[in-house]
Amino acid sequence: MTSRQQLRSHIRALRRSLSTEQQHQASLDLVQQLLPRPEVQQAQHIALYLTNDGELDTTPLIQALWQQGKSLYLPLLHPVVPGYLVFQLYTPDTLLTPNQFGIGEPELNCSLLRPVSQLDLMFTPLVAFDSQGQRLGMGGGFYDRTLSQLDSTARKPQLIGLAHDCQHVETVPVEAWDIPLPAICTPSRFCTFSEQ
């Protein structure tokens, strides 16, 4: 069986090998897949992420959601609790500074943070996914950890993973702490999975 690390390395190399034109077209196709979805239409407070390491470019999606008047939030590394994320309002005027992973983050402003339980929708990055909705991330566990802190009574945002089609694999090796996704969107299709 392929180890998580081998699979991660293989898929990361695959998505980085996509040409600039392929990446651009994929990002436009993603917007066409997502904008008509009721999950997106009905959401006002949406968390998403800035692209890194060959991930599907979220820039056209961000622009389209802003045009629709949605409030967008970016993940920041938790300032006090290592390994967790917080989500802060992101506007066209937000200044970004690279974090320890080289990913742009707004400067922490506690008045602009929104609790995860008050987000309507969260687009999550991933490295690989399978037909059961299992997600393999970059290995830091930030999303799994952050989402697992919500107790069963808390309102949870709807989760949709974003990925290139080449990131679909037969089976993702699963660990006990992994949180499967109810939906994943690629440039060519929107996949929903039964509640795990």
Image: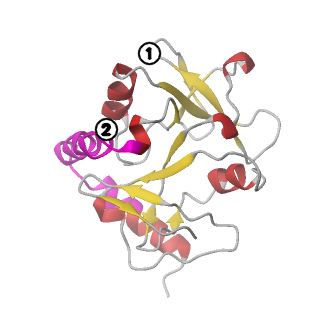
Q: Is residue 145 a member of the stretch shown in magenta? A: no
In the rendered view, does 94 fall on the left or right side of 15?
A: right
| On screen, residue 62 above or below 180 | above
In the rendered view, does 41 fall on the left or right side of 121?
A: left
The residue located at (59%, 45%) in the rendering is 157
Return the residue at label 2: 35
Using the rendered image of the protein, determine whether residue 86 is visible from the camera's viewpoint: no
The residue located at (81%, 41%) in the rendering is 81
Quadrant (top left, top right, bottom left, bottom right) of the C terminus: bottom right
Residue 161 in percent (x, y) is at 46, 53
Q: Which of 79 and 60 is in front in this view?
A: 60
Residue 34 in percent (x, y) is at 32, 43
Magenta range is 12-38
The residue located at (52%, 15%) in the rendering is 94
* Displayed quadrant of residue 10: bottom left
Which mark is first along the chain, 2 or 1?
Answer: 2
| Amino acid type, residue under disc 1 in the picture | Pro
Residue 74 in percent (x, y) is at 56, 32
Q: Is residue 13 a member of the stretch shown in magenta? A: yes
Return the residue at label 1: 92
| On screen, residue 38 above or below 175 | above
Dot 2: element: loop
Residue 25 in percent (x, y) is at 19, 43
Dot 1: element: loop
Using a 10 Å C-alpha cutoff, classify the residue at mark 1 as few (fewer than 14 neighbours), some (14 to 19) or many (20 or more). few
| On screen, residue 49 above or below 7 | above
